Image (cartoon, rainbow, N blue to C red):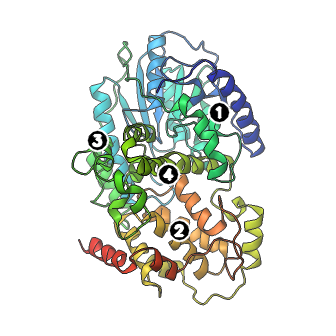
């Protein structure tokens, strides 16, 4: 697929204005606009100017810094490609930095261990390319500006994330870096950048699908090779990183939720899961994906790519490009692309344009009204967060889903819906249900703290991206799910036995 480049700047500029206006209305402090100067490798609509520095953009020789965060990979990474091309154009050296914090949204050993092991691989691959990798530790809003100042960088390139904490970090860094530094944000996570796909919060998959599809010819393109800048890094070299020590420290600190063994970290393992001859999803399971993906008793029916996509250890765009080559399995490919692009990018859209993406205030008016109207309805069962966390309810199916998450760091997508809806049914108020579901999801799911996770909880409990249904106690007009419906849909006993066996194994 070739990029249609002639009209991209006009379309991007129009979208940027809408996106900027909407974000300002939502209280976003950081001014941003689509970059006017693209590169031959990166569509300009994928890049936003967060800060225009006073140093000429093509100032020769000053270092280029790429602050890696959400997209933790050395290949198929638009942010790294853009930073490398800026460095080549300026005759500048390039480096990559990553800022490691001690705590992050309930992350435990399971999450820090997976991330650090993946980053160790990234460092090795960048080193082979001659690109130094610096690991900073502590507060990003302090460390990143200090690093940029220390090395006299002219350009700082950042990853995009729609979550509040990342946006606050980026805003703070922009304020603190010198006025001569230009700061760019690159959406290397979505196929169609979130600000290009839509300039507002979308109501549902139906309303965003056409908007995304219209832009796919411009954005769903093959990756160019990463061309390393000709000027090597001759400044102070990165200090050696004791990865084993960092992993031991992180896993000890978060030992309550230990690492899992079924999912090997890193971009090589991610590529093997996608394309490997023995277990690659597109080689061995895409043919049955449309039929098996909603059957929890067939865990092999899912792609298993979610952790890698969450940590950015694999590119969703690459997954889509590879899937497009398998049109002989059109049914499975179409369903996979719907999940990979439309549903995933709908979640980013919601978190980007809805500041309250993890609270009842972020739900539609109809959902808030119906939930509050039924908040005092009598519950047949009420469980504390502790009982729910331990999987101690009267519902054996729900317990299995919870224990799958606690012990394996994952839960089947269909069961995530049932799981969250039952928390609404078994707690005193919808606000409590939402808080508990997000807490447990972020604490145990390997892909926790992700827009799709927040939207999944908000869909199940608050009707986000859904419509009103027949009114009933507790749920009001929120879509209802029950045990009998699950039993009609799949082999409930088989799923429960699978979870028990997987935990014992």
Name the side, left or right, on which 388 lies relative to 362. left
Disc nearest the viewer among 3 and 4:
4
Q: Secondary structure at mark 4?
A: helix
Q: Label 2, on which residue?
A: 417
Q: Label 1, on which residue?
A: 175
Check disc 2: other Cα within 10 Å, few if <14, some if 14-19, many if 20+.
some
Spatial CA span between label 2 and label 1: 40 Å
Disc nearest the viewer among 3 and 1:
3
Q: Secondary structure at mark 2?
A: helix
> Image height check: is 2 above or below 279?
above
Image spot of residue 351 (x, y percent): 62, 50
Image spot of residue 332 (x, y percent): 41, 51
Q: Earlier in the sequence, mark 4 or mark 2?
A: 4
Q: Earlier in the sequence, mark 2 or mark 1?
A: 1
Spatial CA span between label 4 and label 2: 15 Å
Q: Earlier in the sequence, mark 3 or mark 1?
A: 1
Q: Secondary structure at mark 1?
A: helix
Spatial CA span between label 2 and label 3: 31 Å
Q: Label 3, on which residue?
A: 268
């Amino acid at each position: 697929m070739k990029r249609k480049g002639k009209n991209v700047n006009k379309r991007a500029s129009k979208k940027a204005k809408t996106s900027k206006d909407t974000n300002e209305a939502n209280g976003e402090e950081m001014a941003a606009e689509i970059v006017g100067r693209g590169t031959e490798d990166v569509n300009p609509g994928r890049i936003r100017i967060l800060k225009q520095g006073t140093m000429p953009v093509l100032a020769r020789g000053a270092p280029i810094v790429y602050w890696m965060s959400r997209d933790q990979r050395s290949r198929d990474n638009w942010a790294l490609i853009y930073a490398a091309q800026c460095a080549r154009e300026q005759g500048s050296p390039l480096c990559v930095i990553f800022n490691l914090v001690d705590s992050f949204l309930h992350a435990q050993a399971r999450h820090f261990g997976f991330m650090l092991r993946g980053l160790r691989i990234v460092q090795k691959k960048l080193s082979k390319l001659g690109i130094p990798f610096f690991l900073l530790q502590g507060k990003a809003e302090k460390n990143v500006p200090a690093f940029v100042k220390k090395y006299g960088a002219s350009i700082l390139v950042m990853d995009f994330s729609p979550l509040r904490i990342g946006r606050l970090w980026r805003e703070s860094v922009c304020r603190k870096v010198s006025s001569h530094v230009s700061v760019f944000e690159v959406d290397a996570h979505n196929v169609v950048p979130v600000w290009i796909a839509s300039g507002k919060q979308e109501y549902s998959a139906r309303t965003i699908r056409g908007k995304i599809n219209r832009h796919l010819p411009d954005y769903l393109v093959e990756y160019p090779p990463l061309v390393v800048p000709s000027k090597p890094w001759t400044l102070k070299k990165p200090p050696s990183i004791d990865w084993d020590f960092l992993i031991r420290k992180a896993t000890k600190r978060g030992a309550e939720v230990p690492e899992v063994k079924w999912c090997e970290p890193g971009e090589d393992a991610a590529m093997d899961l996608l394309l490997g001859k023995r277990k690659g999803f597109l080689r061995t399971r895409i043919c049955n994906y449309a039929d098996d993906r909603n059957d929890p008793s067939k865990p092999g029916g899912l792609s298993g790519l979610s952790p890698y996509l969450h940590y950015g250890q694999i590119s969703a765009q690459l997954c889509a490009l590879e899937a497009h080559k398998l049109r002989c399995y059109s049914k499975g490919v179409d369903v996979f692309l719907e999940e990979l692009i439309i549903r995933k990018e709908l979640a980013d859209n919601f978190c980007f344009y809805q500041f309250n993406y993890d609270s009842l205030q972020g739900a539609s008016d109809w959902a808030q009204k119906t939930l509050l109207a039924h908040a005092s309805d009598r519950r047949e069962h009420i469980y504390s967060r502790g009982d729910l966390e331990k999987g101690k309810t009267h519902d054996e199916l729900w317990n299995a889903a919870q224990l799958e998450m606690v012990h394996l760091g994952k839960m089947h997508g269909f069961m995530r819906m049932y799981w969250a809806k039952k928390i609404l049914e078994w707690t005193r108020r919808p606000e409590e249900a939402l808080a508990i579901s997000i807490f447990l999801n972020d604490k145990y799911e390997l892909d926790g703290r992700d827009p799709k996770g927040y939207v999944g909880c908000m869909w199940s409990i608050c009707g986000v991206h859904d419509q009103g249904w027949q009114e009933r106690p507790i749920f009001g007009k929120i879509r209802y799910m029950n045990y009998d419906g699950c039993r009609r849909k799949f082999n409930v006993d088989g799923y429960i036995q699978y979870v028990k066996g997987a935990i014992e194994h």
